Amino acid sequence: MAYLRFTPQEYRALCRARRVVDLRTDDPNFFQVSLLFALADDWPRLAERVAGLLPSQLIVLRNHLRALSGDVGPGPGQDFTPAELEALAQARGTGLATVRPIGPFRDVLVRHFEKVSPVLAKKLAGLSGPQLERLWEEVRRRGRPGT
């Protein structure tokens, strides 16, 4: 599971930068570049650190900043095809039906779908915690296996 640590000053700088960074993008590289521009003048060392983050770390950071902004993105299901929702329903029926919250198991889901459906794996990796919870609940409500 990816995690990040920042000093309190760095964290405040990142929180201020979120106001000028496009958090709606699903492209970690675009997010990284826009964050670098927001930090470069006042926080060059932090900008250097952000430049070295892995894509999975950038997704964690972007999702955290999205949540702080109250923007958890589109509702679940809107960006998923019927086949992807069915694949999630089948995964949910394999023993994950009773898992609540699902957030800590995100990496398990992503690794599972990386081989089966890389596009679905990428979508799941890009969801914030609240988005993943809403998606998991939507799949349960649709009456799929494991409900």
Image (cartoon, helix red, strand yellow):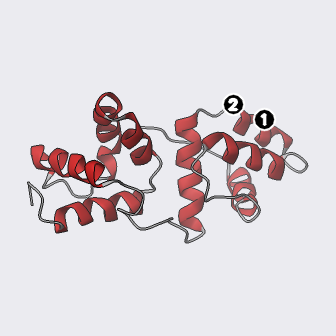
On screen, 146 above or below 116? Answer: below
Which residue extends farthest front? 82
Instruction: Give the x, y percent position of residue 39.
Output: 81, 49
Which residue extends farthest bottom? 70
**Could you tell me which quadrant the C terminus lies in?**
bottom left
Front position in the image: 2 or 147? 147
Which residue extends farthest right? 41
From the image, tell me which residue sits under label 1. 48
The residue sitting at 83% across, 48% down in the picture is: 37
Front position in the image: 67 or 92? 92
The residue sitting at 75% across, 63% down in the picture is: 16
Image quadrant of residue 131?
Answer: bottom left
| Residue type beneath disc 1 | Glu
The residue sitting at 53% across, 55% down in the picture is: 63
| Residue type beneath disc 2 | Gly
Mark 2: few, some, or many residues within 10 Å (few <14, many ≥20)?
A: few
Q: Is residue 71 left or right of residue 92?
A: right
Task: Give me the C-alpha separation between circle 1 and circle 2.
Answer: 7 Å
Instruction: Give the x, y percent position of residue 60.
Output: 52, 47
The residue sitting at 56% across, 42% down in the picture is: 4
Q: Is residue 54 left or right of residue 106?
A: right
From the image, tell me which residue sits under label 2. 52
Q: Is residue 136 left or right of residue 62?
A: left
Front position in the image: 146 or 14? 146
Q: Are marks 1 and 2 in contact (CB under 8 Å)?
A: yes
Instruction: Give the x, y percent position of residue 27.
Output: 60, 45
Instruction: Give the x, y percent position of residue 97.
Output: 13, 54
**Could you tell me which quadrant the N terminus lies in?**
top left
Mark 1: few, some, or many residues within 10 Å (few <14, many ≥20)?
A: few
